[in-house]
Image: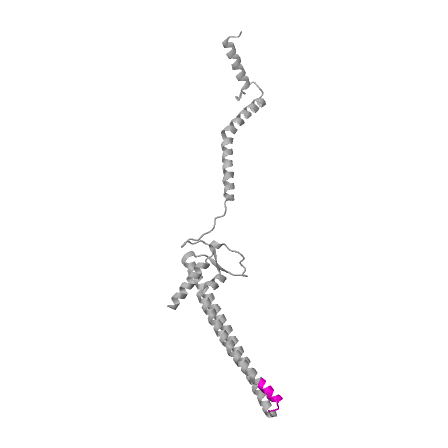
């Protein structure tokens, strides 16, 4: 039986054989010794540096994915804040519907149009009655040739006068309508400028309406209600 000292010596010899010698003066060939040293060094490099670098890489990938999976934040413009390049919108259809002055101007225009229409209808009815009476007199041979010529000339002159008056009223109404539209448009533009200058200072404010080129817009950037409030407040003050 081997004694304890011999057993220890054998264990030491096995450890020496299993561990590659990385010193320059090894007994093995340089290539084989270098290969063993490289393998052991690579294992140490992976353990010492590879794992931390892998953890860092995974963390960067996770942050990258989370960044692009986040929903885009809605751009809001708090009072007094300025953001360059922001575009606001107002809806003209809604403004025209809720602006008090629009209904008043529209009502005035309709009343004037009705007045002209009734006036012209009365004049044309009276003229048509004259024409009917003339035809009856001609059929009954009451009028002389001279009277017929004079009556026809008078009726023609009256007809021309009525047509000219009708055209004149149509021009007046058209000009009045353009004036109303311009007054409403100017009021909307000025109120929009006041709201934007006082609260947002956006670079652009686009008007949307049914059939406009702007198909859709961000509702958080719509200031229609504020413009309507500004318009109605200004109108109430103008009546005082």
| In the displayed structure image, the side of residue 139 where residue 106 appears, left or right | left
> Which of the pair 193/22 is nearer the observer?
193
| In the displayed structure image, the side of residue 190 where residue 160 appears, left or right | right
Taking the magenta stretch, the answer to whether it contains residue 141 is yes
Q: Where is residue 119 in the image (x, y as percent from the top left)?
A: 50, 78
**Where does the magenta region start and end?**
132-142
Taking the magenta stretch, the answer to whether it contains residue 208 is no
> Which of the pair 22/25 is nearer the observer?
22
232 above or below 37?
Answer: below
Q: Which residue lies furthest to the left in this view?
A: 240
Q: Can you see residue 17?
A: yes
Q: Can you see residue 161?
A: no
Q: Where is residue 150 in the image (x, y as percent from the top left)?
A: 58, 90
97 above or below 16?
Answer: below
Q: Which residue is drawn at 50% across and 76% down?
A: 116
**How many labels, in total?**
0
Q: Residue at x 51, y 39 (%)?
A: 62
Point out the image quarter for the C terminus: bottom left
Q: Quadrant of residue 18?
A: top right
Q: Position of residue 58 (x, y in %)?
A: 51, 36
What colour scheme has been applied to the protein in the rendered image?
one colour
> Which of the pair 36/187 is nearer the observer?
187
Q: Where is residue 11 in the image (x, y as percent from the top left)?
A: 52, 14
Main secondary structure type of the part rendered in magenta: helix
């Amino acid at each position: 039986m081997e004694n304890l000292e011999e057993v220890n010596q054998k264990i030491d010899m096995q450890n020496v054989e299993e561990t590659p010698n990385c010193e320059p003066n090894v007994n093995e060939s340089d290539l084989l010794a270098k290969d063993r040293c490289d393998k052991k060094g690579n294992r140490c490099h992976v353990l010492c540096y590879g794992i931390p670098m892998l953890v860092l890489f995974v963390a960067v990938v996770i942050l990258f994915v989370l960044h692009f999976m986040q929903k885009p934040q809605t751009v809001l413009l708090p009072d007094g804040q300025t953001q360059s390049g922001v575009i606001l919108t107002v809806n003209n259809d809604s403004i025209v519907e809720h602006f008090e002055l629009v209904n008043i101007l529209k009502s005035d225009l309709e009343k004037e149009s009705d007045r002209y229409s009734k006036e012209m209808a009365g004049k044309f009815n009276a003229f048509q009655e004259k024409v009917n009476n003339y035809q009856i007199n001609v059929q009954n041979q009451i009028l002389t040739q001279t009277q017929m010529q004079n009556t026809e000339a008078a009726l023609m002159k009256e007809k021309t006068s009525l047509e000219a008056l009708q055209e004149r009223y149509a021009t007046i109404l058209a000009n009045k309508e353009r004036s109303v539209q311009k007054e409403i448009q100017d009021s909307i533009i000025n109120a929009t400028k006041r709201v934007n200058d006082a609260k947002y200072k956006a670079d652009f404010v686009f008007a949307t309406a049914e059939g406009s080129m702007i198909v859709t817009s961000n509702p958080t950037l719509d200031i229609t209600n504020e413009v309507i409030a500004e318009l109605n407040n200004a109108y109430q003050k103008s009546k005082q």
